[in-house]
Amino acid sequence: MKLAIAEEIEDGDVQRCEAGATCVAIFNVGGRFYATSDICTHAYAHLSDGYIDGETVECPLHQGLFHIPTGRAMSPPVTENLRTYATRVEGGAVYVEIDEEETDKPG
């Protein structure tokens, strides 16, 4: 599913996107694009509002850290990993592989 334009997401930045009922964060880390759930697994907060440092994003609510490429929870209070999605850049667009069933789920 086409969710973003690659050149609109600067290196070290993130863009929040909606894929049906699923909120996705697309990160540009050193020219590579990664997609994760945009919602923190600890408490409801948009990670796209968080602080990005290299390959990590800090939740803006309680400062838990996640590894962007893998979604791995790295520090308390987060203990549950983020959902990650495969991405590809084609024709300047960022495509994210999301199951149709997931886009139909209520947020």
Image (spheres, rainbow, N blue to C red):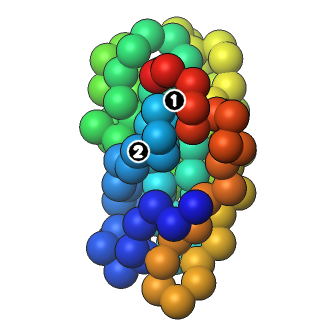
Residue for point 68% across, 56% down: 97
**Residue kind at label 1, given as amino acid type:** Leu
Q: How many marks?
A: 2
**Residue kind at label 2, given as amino acid type:** Glu
Q: Is residue 52 visible?
A: no
Give left or right: position of 28 versus 34. left
Q: Position of residue 55 (x, y in %)?
A: 55, 52
Q: Position of residue 26 (x, y in %)?
A: 47, 55
Q: Quadrant of residue 86?
A: bottom right
Give left or right: position of 64 versus 75. left
Quote the CA–CA distance across marks 1 and 2.
22 Å
* Disc 2 target residue: 18
Q: Position of residue 33 (x, y in %)?
A: 56, 66
Q: Is residue 75 above or below residue 91?
A: above
Q: Residue furthest bottom?
A: 91
* Disc 1 target residue: 65
Q: Position of residue 27 (x, y in %)?
A: 47, 57
Residue for point 40% across, 34% down: 47
